[in-house]
Structures are given as C-alpha cells and as structure tokens.
Amino acid sequence: MTTESTAPTRLRVRLLCAGVAALLCACGPGGPKRETDDGSGGDNGGPSTGISVLAGDAVTGGSANNKGTAARFNTPRGLAVDTNGNVYVADTGNLTIRKIAPDGTVTTFAGLAGASGTTNDKGNRARFTQPTAVTIDGNGDLYVVDNLSIRKITPDADVSTVATLSFGNFGLDVQNYPAGIAADGNGNLFVTSGVDTRRIPISNPRSTTTLETGSVFPVYGTGQLVPRGVTVDPDGTVYVADLTRTLSRATSGATALTAFVGARNQEGNANGNASTARFKQLIALAIDKKGNLYGADAINNTVRKITTPDGTVTTPAGTTNSTTLRTGKLPGSFAQLRGIAVDGSGTLYATSGNAVVKIVLPQ
C-alpha cells in the first residue's frame, strides 16, 4: 500500500533516475567528461599544434629523473636540441645539464644535483657552478656558459673547460655575467653578457672579437642575471638581443653589430615591421631552417617570431604579462620563460617555470 509520506519520495527517485539517464545519453559512454581544448592532444603524443609539457612541472621544482610530468627541474634556463631530437637543458638550480629524450624521459647528462664546483670529468663526476646557457655545434658537442667559464661536453658526456672569461670585464654585479651562447659552423662561439657580445674562436679563445660593448639596460645593483639571446644562421650571420633592447645582427667575419628590428632603448610588445615592432627582453633566441627567428621575450612572457630578411614580428604563442602555464591550443600562456630552442622540423622547446614545454606552430 502506498502512503502519502512515501509517494513523494518515490517520485523524486524516478525523476533523479530520468535525469541521470538523459545526462548519460548526452555525454556518451562513460558519463560526463572534462572540457578540453581543441589542441590538447590527449594520449597520442601531444597536440598537432599548440603547447604541451615535454617534461617537468611548471610550479613544482626538484631534481627527479623520470618521464614527462613526473620529472623535476629547478629553474631551468637555456636549452638546445640535437639532430636526434634530444633536448639538453641548463638546469641552473640543480647545477646540472639534463637530457630529455623525444619521449620525455629525463636523465642527468652531466654534473650532480646540488654539488657545485669546476671539476672536469665525465658525467656525474663533473661539477658546474652556474650553468645558464647551452648550445650545440655540428659535431654534437655542447658548449655551456657556466658562471665565467665556457665548458664543453662531448656526446659521451666528457666535460672540459674551453675558456675562462676575464673577470675584470664583467665587474662584480651578477647583472654583468655572461648568460647567452651560440655556435656557428666555422668553429666560433658567440657569448653575450651584461657588458658586451664576443666572438670567440674555439681553437684560440684568447683571440676574441668584441662585437658590441656598453652596459645592459636595467639599472646596476639589481643583483639579477640578465640573459640576452644570441643565435647563428647557417650562413654565419649572428643575431643578438643587443644591449639597447634592439635585435641586431652581424654577418660572418664582421666586427660590429648592425640594428635589425626595434628601436634603441624603446620597449614594448608591439608586432609589426622592423621599425615599429618592440620587445621587452629577448632573453633567448633560436632560428629554424627557413630562417625564421624565435625569441623568448621575458616580462612580456611571450614567444615572438621574426621573419628574415624583412624583420616582420608576430606573437604566435603566449599571452602578454600572463605568468601561468596554459597548455593546449594557441596562443596559450607560459610560466616564466627563460630559454628557447628549435629542432629540425620547426618544433619549438622552451623552459617555462620549472618545466620544459613543446610548442608546435602552424606551418
């Protein structure tokens, strides 16, 4: 027998079941699903275009060797990619050089986490003081800016010291220290600091050519490292984020930089042609096979694309002034950008917070 007190209860149960059935029909098998971006990629190796995490966690630091988001870095900065798609990272806070395989597996290539020094040796027996920038040459050798030294690491992880740069040219302010490096195809390294840009022959490091000299734009005494991006194209033309916030360049063998994009000591986030575009702080530069330049523009916290030879600037990735990593479809946003590199297929890699991210742009 149905009483007045039980009938409303049964009606509510029937309505609830009907609602659940309707929801399951609308969402398909498995019930409700999380909202995803068009470029989120799922489990098939990342997005066709967009931003994804290759390794690490943007917020959480550490030194764990693991795969993908289970790995940990501590303030990673510069990075470089070899011909096999391995990414090498100057893991500054851990005092190590880390290697990320194409599948996201992270190992420590050279150095030992937390152990500071200048020891030249192999693998984890070597020691670093402050690795901030890394480049790779045609032989697969890595060159690392390590405090005031340039260190070389062979493909089998043997570490040596190529040169120790004169301390007198840098002063006591951390802002003046070298923090950018690139290698050309003629045996030269290009190193940027807070006071100059140098071309250094690897075979004779004392025979240095100074391409620019002055003082970095930020005020002295801040105690902050101020990296400036540098990269070289296959013809030997070097591109430099110069001391006046202008993107400059020098052809192979030149003894001085010439302005390319931007205006001296003018900053901003404007896209446009070579004279109207503005940057905040191009802390890292990379160049692809087509001659397109890519810059990690700190403070703006965006990736800037500069075409050559005309110098047109666009912002293909990142949201100006956002400091939260948002993966998925472009433009997305980044935690603090500190480095950028590009592989042979045009895929970009960047250090963002404590993570290394992969950026695939439309072709």
Image: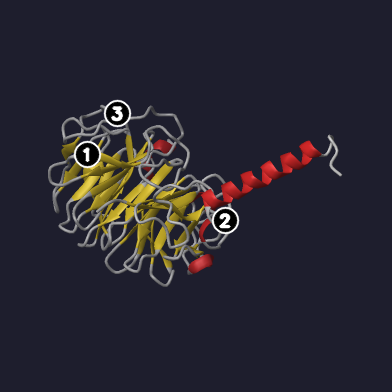
Q: Which residue is mark 3?
A: 268
Could you tell me how far apart the alpha carbons at marks 1 and 3 are, in whole angstroms?
12 Å
Disc ID at residue 63 = 2
- In front of the other: label 2 or label 3? 3
Which of the two discs, 2 and 3, labels the residue nearer the N terminus?
A: 2
Disc 2, SS: loop
Disc ID at residue 313 = 1
Disc 3, SS: loop
Type of amino acid at the residue the image marks with label 1? Val
Q: Position of residue 286 (x, y in %)?
A: 28, 51
The residue furthest bottom is: 156
Residue at 20 percent across and 30 percent down: it is 263
Vertical placement of residue 88 versus 76, above or below: below
Could you tell me how far apart the alpha carbons at marks 2 and 3 are, in whole angstroms?
35 Å
Vertical placement of residue 132 versus 324, above or below: below
Type of amino acid at the residue the image marks with label 3? Gly
Q: Is residue 281 left or right of residue 185?
A: right
Q: Position of residue 9 (x, y in %)?
A: 78, 39
Image quadrant where one finds the C terminus: bottom left
Which of the two discs, 1 and 3, labels the residue nearer the N terminus?
A: 3
Q: Is residue 147 visible?
A: no
Could you tell me how far apart the alpha carbons at marks 1 and 2 are, in whole angstroms?
36 Å
Q: Is residue 177 left or right of residue 238?
A: right
Q: Position of residue 124 (x, y in %)?
A: 53, 66
Type of amino acid at the residue the image marks with label 2? Ser
Q: Is residue 286 visible?
A: yes
Q: Position of residue 352 (x, y in %)?
A: 44, 46
**Pointers 2 and 3 in contact (CB under 8 A)?**
no
Disc ID at residue 363 = none
